[in-house]
Amino acid sequence: MNPAETNQDCTAKIDASCRVPLLALFGGAALWLVAGLALGIVAVLSFHKPDLFADCPYLSFGRAQAAANDLLLYGFAIPAGLGVMLWIFSRLSRAPLALPLVPIVAANLWHLGVLIGTATILMGGSTGYPWLEYPRAAAVLLLTAFMLVAVTASATFGFRQNRELYPAHWFLFAALLLFPWIYLTANLFLLSNHPPRGVVQAIIDWWFANNLVFLWLGLVGVGTAFYFLPKISGKPLASSGYTLFAFLTLILFGTWTGIPGSAPVPAWLPALSSVAAGLVLVPLVAILIVTLKTISGAGVSSPGSSFRFIQLGMAAFVASGLLYVCQFCPQYSRVLDFTWFGFAQTQLQLLGFAAMILLGAMYDILPRVMGTPLPFPKFARLHFFLTLGGVLLFTIPLLIGGVKQGRMLADAQIPFATVNAGVLNFLRLSTTGQMLILVGALLLLLNIFVMTIKWKIGLFKAALAAVKAPLETAEVKS
């Protein structure tokens, strides 16, 4: 057998070993993405028509928006990121996925934890800490599931045939190590029987939210992009020195931000956070340089290709990072605090950056692991345009409206009701963007659902053919 055939056979075994775990992770992630976007629309409708859900406490803004945010993060971004991570580790290791049954169990535990946590929030049992609203039972399930996936990923990494380490390894393995530390620390402090008192709780939650939403998602998204961009563009990842520098500085400076300037804490805490946020510009510039050098001259033109998803996601990462830094600049934070600006930046980080990169990766991975093309390939192109238009319509009006809202709040002569009415048109535009993103997510869910059904029908037919096949009998020699 020649080397090309050997390499193709190895790749087929790797993809086959990832098939069921990735279907479990990606299928659930797509379903939770649809649910999270739908709940987000329900939540914002309370501003358009305040009495719409007046008789339904389960869908009040406080509950629905918290559940929507957690579904986008815990329901979609993290399991999708874990699935992409497992596949990349297997491909870079040139070895099949180790312990393939373990991530299947982990995926079901994770989705169960998300279901319990979301139901608890909607019934009014939230912990009250932003991005940590899930109760202790759901947190235990999520942490257990993540550790199981980490065991599989680490075993695959340890059994690798190719001993060389790539930039994708640095970012993704760091994310694999950081999540248990971030999530377990926050839960031990805030959800223990004897939590700290006073403003210390807010400080811990700010630290947790920053490290999870900004740093962890940043590591997963950039690591995924640094794997796919060279593969799809046909060019090696440019400037390895810049890549290592960006990796180290992102972890070094990104962990220190998160405390707003208006926080009622000792002045050195928001000051330190502001300085660290300013230094985050360093890895952002380095990542931008590496990305531009890698994609320049790439001969990829299809709008629905994974390359376009990931390319747009990296642009959103830089944009959301710049907006994140602005929030901690004292000159701007006086205007931007307590407005829609922070919410818009977070949604750009979640939907414009993380979701776009993970969607591009999923559209590239699924046909490979399933061994068949997408059932509706044109839906991928339509999904790209819907998500692009939806993210722009969702975030830009809220960013502009947030600035306007902050300036109006600074004027003591303007009643608060007038301030809310002044940004209502911006909310209406953003709701249209949410609906476009929701339609695109439904297209992804339909592709995965049909692909899964076809695969299961193929398994059933193969099993039925094996049952009906005549038994071979050995010839008896006289």
Image (spheres, grey):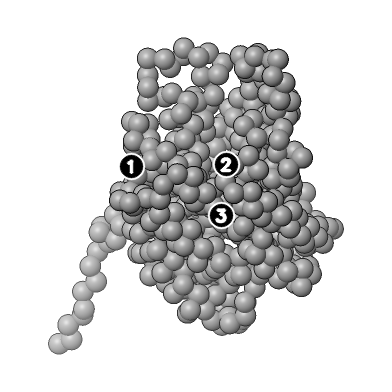
Identify the secondary structure beneath mark 2: loop
Among numbered discs 2 and 1, the one appearing first in the sequence = 1
**Which residue is farthest left?**
478
Asked if marks 1 and 3 touch (Cβ < 8 Å), the reply is no
Total numbered labels placed on residues in the image:
3
Residue type marked 2: Pro
Residue type marked 1: Ile
Q: Quadrant of the N terminus?
A: bottom right
Q: Which residue in the structure is indicated by mark 1?
A: 116
Identify the secondary structure beneath mark 1: helix
Q: Is residue 281 left or right of residue 459?
A: right
- CA distance for labels 2 and 1: 33 Å
Front one among 40 and 432: 40
Among numbered discs 2 and 3, the one appearing first in the sequence = 3
Q: Which residue in the structure is indicated by mark 3?
A: 211
The x and y percentages for residue 293 are 82, 61
Residue 77 visible in the displayed image: no
**What's the residue at 44%, 66% (across, down)?**
150
Asked if marks 2 and 1 touch (Cβ < 8 Å), the reply is no
Residue 264 marker? 2
Residue 333 visible in the displayed image: yes
Above or below: residue 392 compared with residue 105: above
